[in-house]
Structure formats: C-alpha cells, structure tokens
Image (cartoon, grey):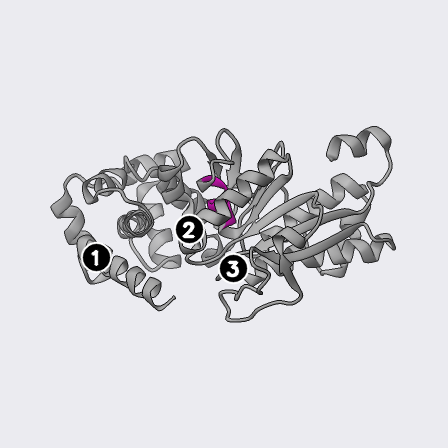
Amino acid sequence: MQERTRNTGQPLATQRFVFLTLPDYTMIALASAVDALRMANRVTKRVAYEWVLATLDGNAAVASNGLAMAPTVALDTAGVADIVFVVGGIHVERAVTSELLAVLRRLARKHVSLGSLCTGGYALAKAGLLDKYKAVIHWESMSALREEFPRVTFSDQLFAIDRDRYTCTGGVAPLDLMMHIIKEQQGRDIAPLISEQFILDRIRNDQDRQHIPLQARVGLFHENLIEAAALMEANIEEPLSLDEIASLVGVSRRQIERLFKRYVGQVPTRYYLDMRLRRARELLLQTAMSIMEIAVACGFQSPPHFSKCYRNLFGHTPSAERQASRLNTLAAGARA
C-alpha cells in the first residue's frame, strides 16, 4: 500500500479495515485506532477509511471493561478488507480457539494483510503467521511470548510494520500506528491536522519504545536513573553488579544509590531484584517453563533461593502460585 502511494503521488481509494475483537479485548486500543480513521475522514473531507467490527459468530465481544460495541458483524459477512486487525486484551490465551486459528490461516492464504492490537499478536503467533516477522505485542506479554515463539522477532517498539503484518502494543499506541499508516497513504500534511484535533503534543513513530522503566514514575529529566533501570531490564538472565551499572551510566555507585533512594524509594539492588521477580512471575503464569528454567532465565543461582525471594515479594512460592492459577483457569473454563 505504501509503495503504490509513493509511486502515484495520489491518495489511495477508500481503505477498509476489519477489527476482529476477541473476548476481553482492550477497548482503549480499539477506540484509539478507529477514532484516528474517523478523524482522517474528517480532515481529508472524503471517505478515506471504512471500518467494521467483527467476531467469528457476529455476537458483540465483551471488552475487558465489561462493555460491548455495536454494530458487530460475523467475520464471514464483513466483506473485503485491506487489513484485518485482531484486537486482544486480557486472558487472550482463552480467546484463541482452533476455529480462530483456522480462520486467520485462511485469510493469510488469501494474501489478506493481517495486524494486531494489544495482545492480538498472540493469535497471529499461535497460528504461525508471525514466523520470521518482526512483531510487537503488549510489553507485559513480551517475555513469555519470546520463549513460546522463538521464530518471531519480538520488538519493544510501539508498533511494527513488516511486509503485510501490522502489529501494535495496547493503550493509545494504536493511534500512533494509524497515524503512521494515514501519513504514508494520505500524505504528510494530514497527520498533523489529526494531531491538532486530538490535542497530541507529538506523533510517536515505530522507533519509540512502548515501555521505559521508571519514566512514568520519575519523568524524562532523570536520565541517569532511567538509563540504569533500562540496563537492569536488559540484563535479567545475567544481572549486572551495581558497580557495572554505575560505570555504564557514567556516574558513581553512590550517586546511583542516592537517585534510587530519593526518587524510587528503594535501594537499586532491591529494585533490580523485584524487577527480576516480576519477570519470573510473567513467565510462571504465561508459559510452561519449569521453575528451574524460570529461575535461570531470571538470574537466580538456585531454585530454593528463587523460591525464597519469590515468597518474600508475592507471599507464596512459585509452585503454589502456578497451581492456583491453573485451578482458576479450570474453574473459569467450567463456568464458560
């Protein structure tokens, strides 16, 4: 689509996007995407985009906030689509059925461009449709999916466009993805007009990261602190010493300790340990990795030490939490 626009210098014909909503999808992700298209039509003064909400059976999916959106149609009656976006949210694994996987594979065989918002990328990865693609998914699911789908190149960017795959994280990031698509298809002058209507200070691009440790907590001006936290996040399996972190940031160990204590309320070693344990919890609840494998992947020397640290933070051992999670899943399946 992008190449055709650049070659002709003319706007494309009306583009039609289908949003395939899964149970418990994230409404803010869907609304951010759809409203960008609506505003594109308004500022271009023509129907540049059409959109349809769909499910497999035509019944409106209930979002994670308990609301459902209408009109929703059955996917097989949604008509021709330039891109089909899978919109996910919480408990996405429960929403990905064999029927859904078969439908997505059929669309891929027909050479329909496929995309995802929030955790919808899980469905595409499970169907094998992101193998050897660069892709994005919500940062909370990233660690687990990197383990489960090693053939997918997961990125921590806000969104990624790789050939005929358009993947995006959640929250308001779909607005940034749509702004990028609109700019490529309708011209560079359109995106700033949309930005003004939405009172956006800046249009983010595919080089912006979706999750920067501590940035929301301490703001943009504490660069040394943010850099130290980013180094910790990038070195989970083989943790760096505090001296190594200070050296890489270019400040003294004492200064790093002061910054963490003042702005985070923790010593840096405690913050680093809690970060590793939270990563371990993601892997514990989202993958089938053994507790030994999780301990190693999160930089712990032995399962007993890992279990003790885990219990100190979360109030129960890794094995107890995994068992409780499985029982909750079985109970939810029985209620459904």
Q: Give the image quarter of residue 107.
A: top right
Closest to the observer, 223 or 67 = 67
Mark 2 or 1: in front is 1
Tell me: 100 left or right of 295: right
Name the spot of residue 4 as percent of width and height, x first.
Answer: 79, 31
Q: For the image shown, how many numbered marks are present on the structure?
A: 3
- Up the image or down, 75 lies above or below 297; here it is below
The residue carrying mark 2 is: 140
The answer to whether any part of residue 212 appears in the image is no
The residue carrying mark 3 is: 25
Q: Earlier in the sequence, mark 2 or mark 1?
A: 2
Mark 3 or 2: in front is 3
Q: Residue at x 53, y 60 (%)?
A: 26
Name the spot of residue 235 as percent of width and height, x first.
Answer: 34, 37
Q: Residue at x 38, y 52 (%)?
A: 259
**Secondary structure found at label 1:** helix
Q: Which residues are magenta?
A: 120-125
Question: Magenta includes 124?
Answer: yes
Residue type, label 1 = Gln
Tag 3 and tag 1, C-beta contact below 8 Å: no
Which disc number belongs to residue 323? Answer: 1
The answer to whether any part of residue 189 appears in the image is yes
Q: Residue furthest bottom?
A: 66
Q: Residue at x 31, y 40 (%)?
A: 236
**Secondary structure found at label 2:** helix
Secondary structure, magenta segment, majority class? helix
Q: Earlier in the sequence, mark 3 or mark 1?
A: 3
Closest to the observer, 59 or 185 = 59
